[in-house]
Amino acid sequence: MFLVSTVLFLASFLMTFVSIPLLIPRLKKRGLLGIDMNKISKPEVPELGGISIIIGFSFGIMLAIFMHTYLHLLELNLTVVLAAFSTIIIIAFIGLIDDLIGWKQGIKQWQHALLPLFAALPLMAIKIDNPAMHIPILGSMPETVMIPFFGAVSFGVFYSLVLVPIGITGASNAANMLAGLNGLEASLISLILATLSLAAFIAGEMEAFVIALALLASFLAFLRYNWYPAKIFGGDTLTLMGGAGIASIVIIGDMEKLGVFLMLLYFIELLLKARTRFKAESFGIPQKDGTLKAPKQIGSLTHVVMRLGRFTEKQVVSILLAMQAAVCIIGFSMFLLF
């Protein structure tokens, strides 16, 4: 299994890593650029880097299917794998459309909330026959419950038709909120994916493990070019795809409680963004000494960190990474214990 996992990881990593240098000049040539708002000079950076993650992730999943079908090196439920893969790719396509239309001119907020519901359909279909419904903290609910006037209600159906689309929509949009600094979104999502891949492997959830491993490899390869100073941005393609990937792994791996806990920073970000009616950005105000100053109105966790001292963009990202790492360690420890 170690050899198979290594091959899958390297395949996704290398496909993403090799595709980025090919994408950068082509994106520049076509004017598909975004402004780096955290630099005084406001340089323009190619911003459809999420395409490289689609390439690497897709290649990794296709390789996993080949290993299962023809080499018999992996035991997978292909229906589950393909359903999760379909949901993640559909979400990525939505993000790609948003990136192509343009920042602040693309898909509206209400559309961001609505469109992922359709992307969740493949996962809704495969979970419909699963009678167990798992609610974070409360745990498993009974297969059916008698409700006055309604009769017997199946929680398995409720999970599939209500909680699955909510999870996909919520996670994909959450990952899109805490973003905007070089390396921030890719590194936060990578930490969560690393935790989920390890948890899925320990739990023996191979379908979730394969999805998590291929995504993790692709995000890490992208991070090499997205880390400060970023040579390419991921755009909404990356953030929406990352959030949908996390939700899909949690759903097919039956790790709802762990998944909810790992998104703790994003819940805090949601509250901060809600204070500004979701009008605030995560950017800072660049200073001549290379540090970032928080705006007057706090609308993001990035602003909270900036208020703690005079930090550079790289330092702000590192502090948030340390916070996410702590959340992952605590969450994984709870997963092992309970």
Image: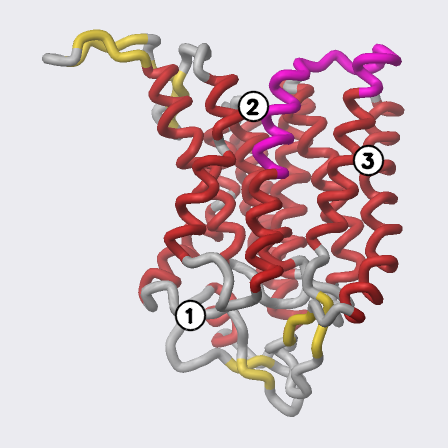
Span shown in magenta:
66-89
Q: Quadrant of the N terminus?
A: top right
Q: Which residue has dot 1 on it?
A: 280
At x 40% / y 72%, what residue is drawn?
Answer: 298
Can residue 242 be seen by looking at this rendering? no
Q: Hey, what amino acid is under mark 1?
A: Ala
Could you tell me which secondary element the residue under label 1 belongs to?
loop
At x 46% / y 35%, what residue is drawn?
Answer: 118
Is residue 62 within the magenta segment?
A: no
The numbered mark, 2 or 1, whose residue comes first in the sequence reads: 2
- Crowding at mark 3 (Cα within 10 Å: few <14, some 14-19, many 20+): many
Q: Hey, what amino acid is under mark 2?
A: Ile
At x 54% / y 77%, what residue is drawn?
Answer: 284
Q: Which residue has dot 2 on it?
A: 252
Q: Is residue 13 left or right of residue 238?
A: right
Across and down, in percent, residue 73 comes to 84, 14
Q: Are marks 2 and 1 in contact (CB under 8 Å)?
A: no
Q: Is residue 270 above or below residue 254?
A: below
Across and down, in percent, residue 275 comes to 32, 65
At x 69% / y 52%, what residue is drawn?
Answer: 50
